[in-house]
Image: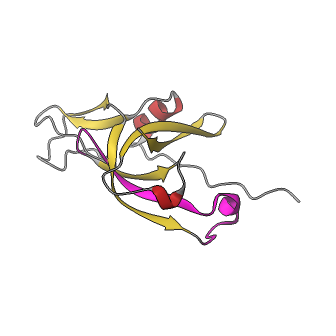
Amino acid sequence: MSEPRKPLPRPAPESSPYWEAAKEHRLEMPHCRACDGYWFPPSRTCPHCTSSDVEFRPVSGQGKVFSFVIFDRVYHPAFAAEVPYVVALVELDEGPRMISNIVGIEPDAVRCDMRLTVVFDDVAEGVSVPKFKPA
């Protein structure tokens, strides 16, 4: 019997540039040319000023743990070997907050305000997921 496969992202039109950049191990966020704001998740209009003058720009990949939870339970069989794992709300230095995993550290050692840097997990052919490790 084969191991269960992890679910893969299914990009919507507004998030395709994000996933294309991630595939190349680059973190890019939507950016508003009108008000200079960044945000996440991607949308077609700026949540700060409602402008549709939007582009994707590279961001530093640096940030901090805003909040987190440690998953000790298997909610999907494909993640059984990873329990326990950390799911965090990461606040990027550019401002947006995104949900991701914290890797490269024991779950019990994760703390709010801990400095992080992005890493990319190549989960399937042509699919990379941004995750974060301690900076």
Q: In which quarter of the image is residue 126?
A: top right
User: Residue 78 in magenta?
Assistant: yes
- Can residue 14 be seen from the camera position used here? no
Magenta stretch holds residue 83: yes
Q: Which of 77 and 90 is in front in this view?
A: 90
Q: Where is residue 92 in the image (x, y as percent from the top left)?
A: 30, 43
Query: Is residue 46 visible to the viewer in this orientation of the structure?
Result: yes
Could you say where residue 31 lies in the image, as x and y percent from the top left?
Answer: 24, 35
Pick the quarter of the image with the N terminus: bottom right
In the shown orientation, is residue 26 left or right of residue 45?
A: right
Q: Is residue 102 left or right of residue 40?
A: right
Tell whether 124 sits left or right of 50: right
Please tell me which residue is depicted at 50% across the width and 65% down the height of the picture: 70
Q: Position of residue 64 (x, y in %)?
A: 32, 47
Please state the extent of the stretch shown in magenta in the rendering. 73-95
Measured as percent of width and height from the top left, residue 113 is found at 30, 52
User: Residue 2 falls in which quadrant of the image?
Assistant: bottom right
Compared to residue 5, the image places residue 92 above or below, namely above
